[in-house]
Image: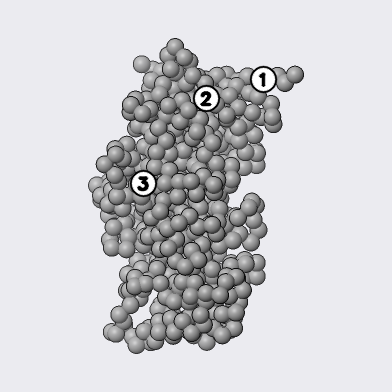
C-alpha cells in the first residue's frame, strides 16, 4: 500500500525557476514558511535562467548614466506599448507594462544589486524596431555572470537564509491538481506525484511559477499563430521539455483564465545543438549583421533584407514563410569571429566567469574558438574556400534540391559590388542599418566595417542553416498587479497567484506581440516580488 506524503506551510511555490526562487526568498524575508516544489531534478534548480544569457531591460541605471543615456519611464512605456501592439482586451498586460516601466529600477535593478549581482558596464541596444517601433535607447543590461550567476546567487541566499529552517524544497514533485476549499473557494494547496508516490501540500497561499509551454512542441503546435506561417515541422526546441504547460491546465480547471498562448517569443536563427540534451535541442544564435540572409534557393530575402537587432518578431514571421521554413546566412570567417555569438550561459564563458580583460581582448580580436567549435561540431554549419565548394555542402545539409548556385553567387557578388562602390553610392537597406548600428559604440565594437563576403583575406567562407527555435511563452495565466490569478469574471481566485513565464511575465502577456528583449528574467523578479508582497500585505490586514 502506497502512503501519501503530506506537507504543510504558510505558502506553496510551484516551480523552482527564477520566479519561484525570488518569490520564496521574499516570503522568507518576511518570516513565512514555504514549500517549494519543482518537477525537475535537483541539478536543474534554477530552471531556464541557468542557461540564459542574462540580459535585462532596465532604465535609469548606473550603467545607463555612465554611457550618457538619458532615459525615462515615460519613454520606455511609450516604446513598450508601440512595440507590443496590444489588443483592447489586454488590459492587465498594459497595466503590468506600466508597472514595469516605473518600477524596474527600484524593484529589479536595485534589488539585485543588494544581493551582490552586478551588470556588464556596456549597455546594448537591441530590438530597435525596423521602423523606429522598438527601443528608442540602449537598455539591454547583461548580468555579470549571466543568468546562471543571477539564479545561483539567489539560490545560495535561499539556502543560507536566517529562516532557512522554514523552507522545504522538494524536487521531482509534479503537481497534478490544485486543491480548493469548497465552502470558501479558496485554493489551499495541491496534489501530485513524486516517483509514482502521491503527495499533498496544504498552504494558505499557492504561487504558480511553473514556466511556460514552449518545451512541449506539440503544445506549441496547438497554439501556433498563423502570422508565422504554418507550424514548422523542422522547429527546434530551445528549452527543457519540463516546460510543458501542464500546470496551466490545473489553473484552468479551477477557473483561472489562461490567455494569449499564441503569443510566443521564438527566434529565427536557431541551429541544432552540437551536444543535445533532449530531442530537437536547439541553440539560438545572435547572428552576424554583416552576413547575407538568404532563402533556401540562395536568393537574398527582400525587398527589405533580414538583419538581426531590430525586430525579432518580424524575423520569425518572415522565416516561417520562406520555402522549406529555413534560411541561410552566408559570411566569411572574419565576420563570424567578430559578430556571431550564441545566446546562453555556457556559450559565453567569459561573461559567465566574469573575466573582463579576456572578454575585452576577445571583442577586439574575435571569438575564433566559438566559430571553430561550430564548424567542427554543428551539423548546420559548413565551411569552404569558395562558393563553388560551399554549395554542395549546403545542399547536403539541407537535404533537398532547392539551392541554386547561380542565384547564390549573384546575391553575394551584387552585395559585395555595392560595398565596393563606397558610401556615396550605397543604396541598400542592410548597409544603412549597419551604418546606424555602428553609431552606437557598443555595436561598433562588435560590427565589421562594411565587410565584403568574398574577401580573400577574410576567408574561408561559412554558411549556416537557421530555423525557428521555440523559446518563451508570452501568454499565460491572467493576473492583476498583485499577481493574483483572475477568473472569467475578472475576479481574483482566493489563495492563487502566478508569476514569471507562467503568468506571461505579468497579466497573461506583459509584452503584447513583441518583446523589447530583456523583459523575461526581470519580470520573473518583479512578478515574484509582487506576489509575495501581496500575500504579506493581505495577512497584515
Residue depth check, mark 2 versus mark 3: number of the one nearer the observer: 2
Q: Mark 3 points at which residue?
A: 511
The reply to whether discs 2 and 3 touch (Cβ–Cβ < 8 Å) is: no
**Quarter of the N terminus within the rendering:** top right
Does residue 127 sit above or below 333 in this rendering? above
**Quarter of the C terminus within the rendering:** top left
Mark before the other along the chain sequence, 2 or 3 = 2
- Residue 168: image location, x then y, percent: 60, 26
Q: Rounded to the nearest whole Å, what is the CA distance between mark 2 and mark 3?
A: 28 Å
Mark before the other along the chain sequence, 1 or 2 = 1
Corner quadrant of residue 90: top left
- Residue 124: image location, x then y, percent: 40, 59
Mark before the other along the chain sequence, 3 or 1 = 1
Which dot marks residue 4?
A: 1
**Residue 10 seen in this snapshot:** no
Corner quadrant of residue 44: top right
Q: Name which residue lies at 29% across and 85% down.
A: 425
Q: Mark 2 points at which residue?
A: 178
Amino acid at each position: 500500500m502506497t502512503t501519501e506524503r503530506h506537507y504543510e506551510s504558510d505558502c506553496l511555490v510551484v516551480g523552482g525557476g527564477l520566479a519561484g526562487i525570488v518569490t520564496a526568498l521574499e516570503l522568507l524575508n518576511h518570516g513565512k514558511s514555504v514549500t517549494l516544489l519543482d518537477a525537475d531534478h535537483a541539478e536543474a534548480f534554477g530552471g531556464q535562467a541557468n542557461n540564459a544569457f542574462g540580459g535585462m531591460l532596465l532604465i535609469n541605471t548606473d550603467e545607463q548614466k555612465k554611457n550618457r543615456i538619458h532615459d525615462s519611464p515615460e519613454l520606455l512605456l511609450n516604446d513598450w506599448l508601440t512595440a507590443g501592439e496590444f489588443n483592447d482586451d489586454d488590459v492587465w498586460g498594459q497595466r503590468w507594462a506600466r508597472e514595469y516601466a516605473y518600477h524596474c529600477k527600484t524593484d529589479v535593478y536595485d534589488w539585485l544589486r543588494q544581493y551582490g549581482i552586478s551588470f556588464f558596464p556596456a549597455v546594448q541596444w537591441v530590438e530597435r524596431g525596423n521602423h523606429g517601433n522598438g527601443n528608442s535607447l540602449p537598455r539591454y543590461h547583461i548580468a555579470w555572470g549571466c543568468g546562471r550567476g543571477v539564479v545561483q546567487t539567489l539560490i545560495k541566499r535561499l539556502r543560507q537564509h536566517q529562516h532557512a529552517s522554514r523552507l522545504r524544497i522538494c524536487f521531482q514533485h509534479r503537481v497534478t491538481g490544485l486543491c480548493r476549499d469548497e465552502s470558501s473557494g479558496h485554493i489551499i494547496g495541491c496534489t501530485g506525484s513524486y516517483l509514482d508516490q502521491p503527495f499533498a501540500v496544504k498552504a494558505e497561499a499557492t504561487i504558480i511559477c511553473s514556466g511556460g509551454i514552449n518545451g512541449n512542441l506539440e503544445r506549441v503546435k496547438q497554439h501556433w499563430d498563423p502570422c508565422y506561417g504554418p507550424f514548422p515541422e523542422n522547429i527546434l526546441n530551445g528549452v527543457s521539455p519540463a516546460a510543458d504547460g501542464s500546470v496551466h491546465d490545473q489553473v484552468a480547471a479551477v477557473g483561472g483564465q489562461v490567455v494569449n498562448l499564441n503569443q510566443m517569443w521564438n527566434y529565427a536563427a536557431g541551429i541544432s545543438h552540437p551536444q543535445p540534451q533532449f530531442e530537437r535541442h536547439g541553440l539560438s544564435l545572435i547572428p552576424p549583421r554583416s552576413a547575407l540572409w538568404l532563402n533556401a534557393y540562395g536568393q537574398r530575402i527582400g525587398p527589405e533584407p533580414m538583419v538581426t537587432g531590430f525586430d525579432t518578431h518580424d524575423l520569425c514571421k518572415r522565416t516561417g514563410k520562406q520555402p522549406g521554413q529555413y534560411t541561410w546566412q552566408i559570411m566569411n570567417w572574419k565576420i563570424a569571429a567578430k559578430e556571431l555569438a550564441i545566446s546562453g550561459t555556457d556559450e559565453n564563458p567569459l561573461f559567465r566567469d566574469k573575466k573582463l580583460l579576456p572578454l575585452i581582448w576577445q571583442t577586439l580580436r574575435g571569438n575564433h574558438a566559438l566559430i571553430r567549435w561550430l564548424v567542427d561540431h554543428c551539423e548546420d554549419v559548413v565551411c569552404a574556400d569558395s562558393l563553388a565548394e560551399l554549395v554542395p555542402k549546403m545542399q547536403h545539409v539541407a537535404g533537398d534540391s532547392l539551392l541554386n548556385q547561380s542565384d547564390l553567387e549573384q546575391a553575394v557578388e551584387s552585395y559585395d559590388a555595392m560595398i565596393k562602390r563606397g558610401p556615396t553610392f550605397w543604396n541598400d537597406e542592410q548597409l544603412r542599418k549597419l551604418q546606424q548600428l555602428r553609431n552606437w559604440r557598443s555595436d561598433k565594437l562588435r560590427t565589421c566595417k562594411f565587410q565584403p563576403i568574398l574577401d580573400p583575406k577574410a576567408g574561408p567562407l561559412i554558411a549556416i542553416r537557421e530555423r525557428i527555435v521555440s523559446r518563451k511563452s508570452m501568454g499565460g495565466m491572467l493576473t492583476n498587479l498583485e499577481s493574483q490569478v483572475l477568473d472569467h469574471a475578472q475576479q481574483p481566485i482566493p489563495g492563487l497567484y502566478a508569476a514569471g513565464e507562467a503568468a506571461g511575465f505579468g497579466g497573461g502577456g506583459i509584452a503584447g506581440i513583441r518583446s523589447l528583449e530583456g523583459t523575461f528574467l526581470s519580470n520573473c523578479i518583479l512578478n515574484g516580488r509582487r506576489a509575495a508582497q501581496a500575500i504579506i500585505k493581505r495577512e497584515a490586514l
